[in-house]
Amino acid sequence: MRIQELLGVDLPIIQAPMAGVQNSKLALAVSSVGALGSIPCAMLSHDALRAELSHIQSQTQAPINVNFFSHHQAELNVERDAIWRRTLAPYFREYSIDSDALPEGPSRQPFSNTVADILEEFRPRVVSFHFGLPEKALLARVKAWGATVLSTATTLEEALWLEANGADAIIAQGLEAGGHRGMFLSEELGLQVSTYSLLQQILARVSLPVIATGGIVDAKGVSAALSLGAAAVQVGTAYLLCDETNTSTLHRQAIKSNRSHKTVITNLFSGKPARGIVNRVIHELGPISELAPEFPHAATAITAIRQQAEAQGCSDFSPLWCGQNTTGCKEISAAELTLELARGVEV
Ligand SMILES: Cc1cc2nc3c(=O)[nH]c(=O)nc-3n(C[C@H](O)[C@H](O)[C@H](O)COP(=O)(O)O)c2cc1C
């Protein structure tokens, strides 16, 4: 089956779900020209999720991909958290923050039965997961209404695991990709490979359709990925400046600046590795810290500093998620960008 039939869309192009910078407005714009729009749901409350799904239902019959995290939610390790707060103490002092009285960081609950209850009311055609897949019974609930299930692999081993455990298509996320790495079997960053290498490694061993993602920003990139055998592409970073995103002014400034090519994989902002533009806190602490609490608990302390800094117009502590290739980022409508990308698809 062609991937367009599996996903219910005309174009083999998926707008990547991007938590924190977009909602259904971007997804609907992308969907309006025949590609698959996505909404990131990992940080939505149950009420907000229901509101987004109702809004989409009122606007379109076309499928929209709903995206969730399926990580194992670690308990907060109080000792490690205290060490982390001590590491960040100079910044707390700089911004006069009481590190003993921090509000909890942004919620990132894994996919759950409660969320599946809400989805069942709407029966979305495409559901994607980052960080593996939910446990078997929960995944079976999603598949029971006929959803196509996508999940991200960052290594060949992860792709083989996803194939054996119920994914319908695999998103091959290369090292270039912006945002969180979907890695779930190994934490070994040194084993992560670039998009085209990963795509070909997976295609050689897996029979499911493979969607290439990471560093694909224009028609030439789309064409290259498809000619290497990708069934579709997923594009994130290129959409970050589009009119329909909520990318903050500071984030936009960083993407448009002459430092946008300086991205690294860092765990400082959430506890899991993610790619973003280098800023002061990454520069001073180093991108990867053994001391950062486990995902998502690392977010609590740094978010408190980030909020104070951002209020002063400073992105020194902001997660400036961004892929390695920003050459396709344009301040145009998402429909225009999607149609530009579509020129890379042979018809
Ligand atoms: C700002 C940002 C936020 C992201 N958030 C998510 C997310 O919530 N869920 C997800 O599955 N992937 C997320 N990603 C990763 C994308 O799905 C995709 O792997 C990546 O954007 C592809 O690389 P590119 O940015 O070079 O196009 C995010 C990426 C970015 C840039």
Image (cartoon, helix red, strand yellow):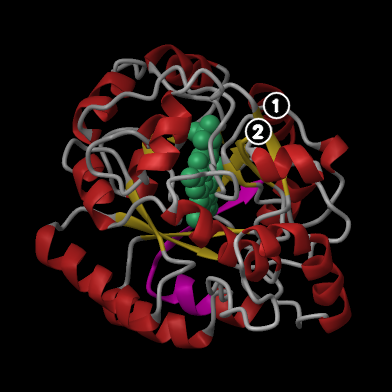
Q: Amino acid at mark 2?
A: Gly
Q: Position of residue 335 (x, y in %)?
A: 20, 33
Left or right of 108 in this view: 14:
left
Residue in front for this viewpoint, 44 or 33: 44
Residue in front for this viewpoint, 108 or 134: 108
Q: Is residue 113 above or below residue 178?
A: below
Q: Amino acid at mark 1?
A: Ser
Question: Does the residue at mark 1 contact the one at mark 2 (Cβ under 8 Å)?
Answer: yes
Of mark 1 and mark 2, the one earlier in the sequence is 2
The CA span between labels 1 and 2 is: 4 Å
Q: Residue at x 22, y 27 (%)?
A: 332
Question: Which numbered circle lies on residue 174?
Answer: 2
Q: Look at the image and give the residue range highlighted in magenta.
A: 140-153
Q: Residue at x 29, y 82 (%)?
A: 121
Q: Residue at x 20, y 53 (%)?
A: 62
Residue in front for this viewpoint, 98 or 146: 98
Q: Is residue 110 above or below residue 312?
A: below
